[in-house]
Image (spheres, rainbow, N blue to C red):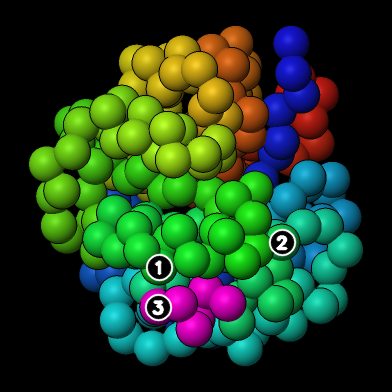
Protein backbone atom coordinates (compact mmCIF):
# COMPACT_ATOMS: atom_id res chain seq x y z
CA UNK A 1 0.00 0.00 0.00
CA UNK A 2 1.29 3.44 -0.92
CA UNK A 3 2.59 5.89 1.64
CA UNK A 4 0.12 8.60 2.52
CA UNK A 5 1.42 12.17 2.64
CA UNK A 6 0.67 13.89 5.95
CA UNK A 7 -0.25 17.48 5.13
CA UNK A 8 -1.11 20.02 7.84
CA UNK A 9 -3.32 22.91 6.76
CA UNK A 10 -2.29 26.47 7.52
CA UNK A 11 -5.32 28.67 6.86
CA UNK A 12 -4.35 32.33 6.92
CA UNK A 13 -6.72 35.23 7.51
CA UNK A 14 -5.48 38.72 8.35
CA UNK A 15 -1.95 37.29 8.81
CA UNK A 16 -3.19 34.89 11.49
CA UNK A 17 -3.57 31.10 11.48
CA UNK A 18 -7.27 30.32 11.83
CA UNK A 19 -9.77 27.51 11.37
CA UNK A 20 -13.26 28.14 10.10
CA UNK A 21 -16.24 25.84 10.61
CA UNK A 22 -17.75 24.90 7.22
CA UNK A 23 -15.96 27.86 5.64
CA UNK A 24 -17.86 30.46 7.66
CA UNK A 25 -15.64 33.49 8.47
CA UNK A 26 -18.01 34.38 11.34
CA UNK A 27 -17.26 31.02 12.93
CA UNK A 28 -13.50 31.09 13.29
CA UNK A 29 -10.89 30.22 15.87
CA UNK A 30 -7.50 31.96 15.87
CA UNK A 31 -4.69 29.52 16.66
CA UNK A 32 -1.61 31.65 16.05
CA UNK A 33 -0.56 35.17 15.10
CA UNK A 34 2.63 33.80 13.50
CA UNK A 35 2.01 31.60 10.41
CA UNK A 36 5.75 31.14 9.79
CA UNK A 37 6.32 29.79 13.30
CA UNK A 38 3.34 27.44 12.80
CA UNK A 39 4.79 26.22 9.50
CA UNK A 40 8.16 25.51 11.12
CA UNK A 41 6.42 23.69 13.96
CA UNK A 42 4.65 21.31 11.57
CA UNK A 43 7.82 20.87 9.54
CA UNK A 44 9.79 19.84 12.63
CA UNK A 45 6.99 17.44 13.62
CA UNK A 46 7.58 15.54 10.38
CA UNK A 47 4.96 16.87 7.94
CA UNK A 48 5.52 15.78 4.34
CA UNK A 49 4.05 18.95 2.91
CA UNK A 50 2.10 22.06 3.94
CA UNK A 51 -1.32 23.04 2.59
CA UNK A 52 -1.37 26.83 2.87
CA UNK A 53 -4.68 28.57 2.27
CA UNK A 54 -5.16 32.30 1.71
CA UNK A 55 -8.65 32.69 3.18
CA UNK A 56 -8.75 36.44 2.57
CA UNK A 57 -8.15 35.83 -1.14
CA UNK A 58 -10.74 33.03 -1.17
CA UNK A 59 -13.36 35.39 0.27
CA UNK A 60 -12.15 38.37 -1.84
CA UNK A 61 -11.12 40.28 1.31
CA UNK A 62 -7.43 40.79 0.52
CA UNK A 63 -4.21 38.82 0.14
CA UNK A 64 -1.68 37.03 2.36
CA UNK A 65 0.67 36.08 -0.46
CA UNK A 66 3.67 37.90 1.04
CA UNK A 67 3.56 35.82 4.20
CA UNK A 68 2.89 32.64 2.19
CA UNK A 69 6.01 33.33 0.13
CA UNK A 70 7.98 33.71 3.35
CA UNK A 71 6.66 30.32 4.53
CA UNK A 72 7.99 28.81 1.29
CA UNK A 73 11.36 30.50 1.79
CA UNK A 74 11.76 29.62 5.46
CA UNK A 75 10.75 25.95 5.37
CA UNK A 76 12.37 23.12 3.45
CA UNK A 77 9.33 20.90 2.83
CA UNK A 78 7.12 21.49 -0.22
CA UNK A 79 4.04 23.67 0.05
CA UNK A 80 0.87 23.74 -1.97
CA UNK A 81 -0.92 27.06 -2.08
CA UNK A 82 -4.70 27.36 -2.21
CA UNK A 83 -7.30 30.06 -2.00
CA UNK A 84 -8.32 32.79 -4.41
CA UNK A 85 -5.95 31.82 -7.23
CA UNK A 86 -8.30 33.08 -9.92
CA UNK A 87 -6.10 34.91 -12.43
CA UNK A 88 -3.27 33.71 -14.63
CA UNK A 89 -0.91 36.32 -13.19
CA UNK A 90 -1.47 35.31 -9.56
CA UNK A 91 -1.10 31.60 -10.38
CA UNK A 92 2.18 32.24 -12.18
CA UNK A 93 3.44 34.40 -9.30
CA UNK A 94 2.72 31.60 -6.82
CA UNK A 95 4.30 28.91 -9.00
CA UNK A 96 7.49 30.99 -8.98
CA UNK A 97 7.94 30.17 -5.28
CA UNK A 98 5.70 27.15 -4.54
CA UNK A 99 5.89 23.65 -6.04
CA UNK A 100 2.11 23.31 -6.39
CA UNK A 101 -1.06 25.35 -6.62
CA UNK A 102 -4.54 24.15 -5.74
CA UNK A 103 -7.12 25.41 -8.23
CA UNK A 104 -10.87 25.14 -7.77
CA UNK A 105 -12.98 28.07 -8.93
CA UNK A 106 -10.61 28.93 -11.79
CA UNK A 107 -10.32 25.29 -12.89
CA UNK A 108 -14.08 25.01 -13.30
CA UNK A 109 -14.75 28.48 -14.65
CA UNK A 110 -11.82 29.11 -16.99
CA UNK A 111 -10.44 26.01 -18.67
CA UNK A 112 -8.47 28.16 -21.15
CA UNK A 113 -6.32 29.70 -18.40
CA UNK A 114 -6.01 26.29 -16.75
CA UNK A 115 -4.69 24.77 -19.98
CA UNK A 116 -2.27 27.67 -20.56
CA UNK A 117 -0.85 27.51 -17.03
CA UNK A 118 -0.56 23.71 -17.10
CA UNK A 119 1.19 23.82 -20.48
CA UNK A 120 3.70 26.35 -19.14
CA UNK A 121 4.41 24.77 -15.74
CA UNK A 122 3.26 21.15 -16.09
CA UNK A 123 0.06 19.44 -14.97
CA UNK A 124 1.94 17.80 -12.08
CA UNK A 125 2.17 21.22 -10.39
CA UNK A 126 -1.58 21.69 -10.35
CA UNK A 127 -3.92 20.09 -7.82
CA UNK A 128 -7.57 20.31 -8.82
CA UNK A 129 -9.74 21.25 -5.85
CA UNK A 130 -13.10 19.51 -5.92
CA UNK A 131 -14.88 20.90 -2.88
CA UNK A 132 -18.16 19.05 -2.58
CA UNK A 133 -21.46 19.36 -0.82
CA UNK A 134 -23.85 16.40 -1.03
CA UNK A 135 -21.90 14.97 -3.96
CA UNK A 136 -21.92 18.19 -6.02
CA UNK A 137 -18.91 20.45 -6.61
CA UNK A 138 -19.03 23.96 -5.13
CA UNK A 139 -16.74 26.92 -5.93
CA UNK A 140 -16.16 30.60 -5.07
CA UNK A 141 -15.42 30.00 -1.39
CA UNK A 142 -18.15 27.33 -1.32
CA UNK A 143 -20.82 29.90 -2.11
CA UNK A 144 -21.62 28.73 -5.64
CA UNK A 145 -22.94 25.32 -6.65
CA UNK A 146 -21.63 24.22 -10.07
CA UNK A 147 -24.22 21.49 -10.50
CA UNK A 148 -21.34 19.18 -11.48
CA UNK A 149 -21.32 15.74 -9.88
CA UNK A 150 -18.11 15.13 -7.90
CA UNK A 151 -17.14 11.90 -9.65
CA UNK A 152 -18.05 13.16 -13.11
CA UNK A 153 -16.06 16.34 -12.47
CA UNK A 154 -12.95 14.40 -11.46
CA UNK A 155 -13.27 12.09 -14.46
CA UNK A 156 -13.43 15.11 -16.76
CA UNK A 157 -10.15 16.48 -15.39
CA UNK A 158 -8.48 13.05 -15.56
CA UNK A 159 -9.42 13.01 -19.25
CA UNK A 160 -7.69 16.40 -19.60
CA UNK A 161 -4.50 14.89 -18.15
CA UNK A 162 -4.70 16.03 -14.53
CA UNK A 163 -4.05 13.44 -11.84
CA UNK A 164 -4.10 15.05 -8.38
CA UNK A 165 -7.35 16.02 -6.67
CA UNK A 166 -8.10 17.57 -3.31
CA UNK A 167 -11.54 16.58 -2.05
CA UNK A 168 -12.94 18.70 0.76
CA UNK A 169 -16.32 17.72 2.13
CA UNK A 170 -17.71 21.13 2.99
CA UNK A 171 -20.32 19.98 5.49
CA UNK A 172 -17.60 18.24 7.52
CA UNK A 173 -14.82 20.83 7.31
CA UNK A 174 -13.84 22.04 10.76
CA UNK A 175 -16.51 19.88 12.41
CA UNK A 176 -14.45 16.85 13.56
CA UNK A 177 -17.36 14.63 12.41
CA UNK A 178 -15.17 12.21 10.49
CA UNK A 179 -14.32 12.10 6.77
CA UNK A 180 -16.81 11.43 3.98
CA UNK A 181 -15.56 7.91 3.27
CA UNK A 182 -18.17 7.17 0.62
CA UNK A 183 -17.17 10.08 -1.65
CA UNK A 184 -13.47 9.42 -1.09
CA UNK A 185 -13.87 5.72 -1.92
CA UNK A 186 -15.65 6.49 -5.20
CA UNK A 187 -13.00 9.04 -6.16
CA UNK A 188 -10.11 6.69 -5.33
CA UNK A 189 -11.68 4.13 -7.69
CA UNK A 190 -11.26 6.47 -10.66
CA UNK A 191 -8.35 5.23 -12.76
CA UNK A 192 -5.59 7.83 -12.89
CA UNK A 193 -6.83 9.91 -9.94
CA UNK A 194 -4.70 10.54 -6.85
CA UNK A 195 -6.89 11.82 -4.04
CA UNK A 196 -5.99 14.04 -1.09
CA UNK A 197 -8.63 13.80 1.65
CA UNK A 198 -9.72 16.92 3.53
CA UNK A 199 -12.51 17.71 5.97
CA UNK A 200 -13.75 16.03 9.12
CA UNK A 201 -10.62 14.17 10.28
CA UNK A 202 -11.01 13.97 14.05
CA UNK A 203 -8.89 11.08 15.32
CA UNK A 204 -6.18 8.62 14.34
CA UNK A 205 -8.72 5.99 13.26
CA UNK A 206 -10.06 8.42 10.62
CA UNK A 207 -6.61 8.57 9.02
CA UNK A 208 -6.38 4.77 9.07
CA UNK A 209 -9.73 4.55 7.28
CA UNK A 210 -8.85 7.04 4.56
CA UNK A 211 -5.51 5.31 4.06
CA UNK A 212 -7.26 1.97 3.60
CA UNK A 213 -9.49 3.52 0.94
CA UNK A 214 -6.38 4.45 -1.03
CA UNK A 215 -5.90 8.22 -0.68
CA UNK A 216 -2.47 9.65 -1.56
CA UNK A 217 -2.54 12.32 1.13
CA UNK A 218 -4.50 13.52 4.12
CA UNK A 219 -4.95 17.12 5.24
CA UNK A 220 -4.98 17.72 8.98
CA UNK A 221 -6.72 20.83 10.27
CA UNK A 222 -8.82 21.35 13.36
CA UNK A 223 -7.95 17.97 14.92
CA UNK A 224 -4.27 18.88 14.73
CA UNK A 225 -4.73 22.38 16.14
CA UNK A 226 -7.02 21.14 18.91
CA UNK A 227 -4.39 18.47 19.76
CA UNK A 228 -6.74 15.55 19.17
CA UNK A 229 -4.14 14.09 16.83
CA UNK A 230 -0.42 14.60 16.19
CA UNK A 231 1.62 14.49 13.00
CA UNK A 232 3.94 11.98 14.66
CA UNK A 233 1.02 9.61 15.37
CA UNK A 234 -0.33 9.86 11.84
CA UNK A 235 3.17 9.23 10.41
CA UNK A 236 3.33 5.91 12.24
CA UNK A 237 0.31 4.59 10.29
CA UNK A 238 0.71 6.57 7.06
Q: Position of residue 107 (x, y in %)?
A: 36, 56
- Depth check, mark 1 against mark 3: the one in front is 1
Residue positioned 80% across, 36% down in the render: 232
Residue 201 sits above or below residue 209 on the image: below
Magenta residues (range): 87-92
Disc nearer the start of the sequence (2/1): 2
- As measured in the structure, the alpha-carbon distance from the residue carrying label 2 to the one carrying label 3 is 18 Å
Q: Estimate how packed mark 2 is, as few (under 14), some (14 to 19) or many (20 or more) residues with alpha carbons within 10 Å.
A: some
Find out whether the residues at labels 2 and 3 contact each other: C-beta distance under 8 Å: no
Q: Which mark is residue 113?
A: 1
Residue 37: x, y in percent? Answer: 75, 73
Q: Residue at x 73, y 82 (%)?
A: 70
CB within 8 Å, label 1 to label 3? yes
Q: Is residue 135 magenta?
A: no
Residue tagged 3: 87
Q: Residue at x 65, y 48 (%)?
A: 124
Residue 140 vs residue 25, the one in the foreground: 140
Q: Which residue is mark 2?
A: 99
Amino acid sequence: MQKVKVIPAIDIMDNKVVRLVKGDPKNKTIYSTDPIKTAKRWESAGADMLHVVDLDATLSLGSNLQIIERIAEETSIPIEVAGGLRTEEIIENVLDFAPKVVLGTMAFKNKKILQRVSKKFGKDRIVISTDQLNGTIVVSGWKENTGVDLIRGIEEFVNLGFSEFLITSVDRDGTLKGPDLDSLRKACNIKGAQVIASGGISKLQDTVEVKNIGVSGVILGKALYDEKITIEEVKTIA
